[in-house]
Image: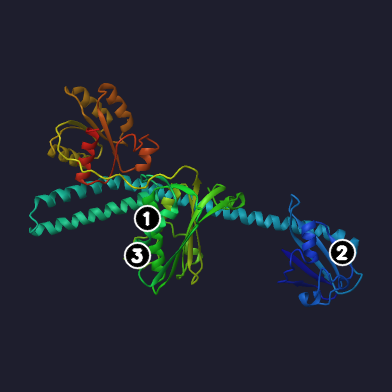
Amino acid sequence: MVFSYLIGEKADLLQGIAFPWGKGIAGAVFTSGKPEVITDVKQDQRHFPGIDAMTGHVTRDMIVIPLKRWAGEPIGVLTILNKHTGRLDEDDMDVLVVIAALSAAAIEQTRATKSLRESEEQLFHAQKMEAIGRLAGGIVHDFNNLVTVISCFSQLLLESLDPQDPQAKKVEQIKIAGERAAELTQKLLTFSRKQILEPKILNLNEIVPETEQMLLRLIGEDITLQAGLAPDLALVKADPAQIEQVLMNLAVNARDAMPTGGRLTITTTNVHVDQTYATRHVRLQAGPYVMLAMSDTGCGMDTETQRHIFEPFFTTKAEGKGTGLGLSIVYGIVKQSGGHIEVESEPKQGTTFRLYFPKVEDAIESVVPPPVVAQPLVGNETILLVEDEEPLRRLISYLLQRWGYMVLEAQHSEEALHTLEQHAGPIHLLLTDVVLPGISGCKLWEKVKALQPTVRVLFMSGHADETITQYGVVGRDRPFLKKPFAPAVLGQKVREVLEV
């Protein structure tokens, strides 16, 4: 930063002058931190050859004062020019040193104020996104119960109708609506970071090529797909399926921004986030990261649009052309994976999304899922069912009895314990919601297990994050069924738990 003033008969502020650091006197003063008085610039062509051409004025004397931070680090120089020889001296420099100190303090204060304002805006945005996420998660928890009832009963009704029955088509539409509602709730769970992840130690360079063909089908033939993958890319811990979802959602967003064609570029690289950069971004820690970037040559976005793009249901598309959840899902996946996301865009200049995932050192794990083996649905065991939502409880009870199980129903934990005390025979399985009035499903299982040590447990909930953290359910250690679910999924999961 160079401040240049002309003093004398024509006081004037010279703007737009950039003196090359390291070559001119300004660069020397900036480097040394010591003020300099040049009594005859014309005689010092080593520092300033062609000084008149640079300033547009006949220059003879010059004083250059370093601008320093409070800690003493230089941030620029204050340059005073005079067209007469011998007019500037050491006394002038002493006065200007004080002026330079005041100027540097004002600059630092301005920077600090700007930085504070930016931090406050980022914190407000982060808090807003957290609040929206909690609201979405709360809605989903109740909505999942309703969707499960609608989807399951419509499927059962379809099975009982002749495919040629005119009513079958109506029921089919109910079933389709239920499935779409289930997809919507899953998207909201993803945004609110309440879905269950299956993270693996992986290399993002392996995920990108695997999704390339799928991305090409999404973006169409008029958009060129390019990839620039770092050969020595570090490892990250993330859910491979969720990373694929991120790539697809970003690609769809880019495609819509390039209706007449363009170029889509995916790059990966290792980066180190320093403390200065991390300080400017709320909740970002300094350290090594793997960056995945996707850039397009599309229409771009203005600043106001960028402030809202990660909010659920926000969209700039025409009505009926999207739900506005694509980028919200990307935001939720990246944040739940411990990463950071930022966007750079200008109208008519394209858009770049940069995703930062923390680097890990563990060995690569296999991302190939184990084969799914269909389990039979029928059984004759006794199941204690605990669910506070009556319509859902009746549905699950009906399905289980239909498959041959004996079902004992309870609305909450106290009723379940009372039912257990009144039942003479063994309980083979406790099928319980996690979030219950009074005692939680996990606490209930501990009490039931104390009374009947051989009892198995299957937890279910529409609040995946809550089940894992607050209530202590870990999917790999304790069987878990995510709502909404199809009848066959319920039946197969019950048999899977009972036959372990």
- Badge nearest the viewer, 2 or 3: 3
Q: Mark 1 points at which residue?
A: 245
Q: Which residue is drawn at 16% across and 31% down?
A: 381
- Residue count near mark 1 (Cα–Cα under 10 Å), binned few <14, some 14–19, many ≥20: some
Residue 96 placement: quadrant: bottom right
- Badge nearest the viewer, 1 or 2: 1
Question: In whole angstroms, how far apart are the C-alphas of marks 1 and 2?
Answer: 63 Å
Q: Which residue is drawn at 23% across and 31% down?
A: 429
Question: In whole angstroms, how far apart are the C-alphas of marks 1 and 3?
Answer: 12 Å
What SS does tag 3 mark?
Answer: helix
- Residue count near mark 2 (Cα–Cα under 10 Å), binned few <14, some 14–19, many ≥20: some
Tag 3 or tag 1, which sits nearer the N-term? 3
Does residue 81 appear in this view? yes
Q: Which amino acid does label 2 sit on?
A: Val
Residue 279 location (% of width, % of height): 59, 50
Q: Mark 2 points at which residue?
A: 37
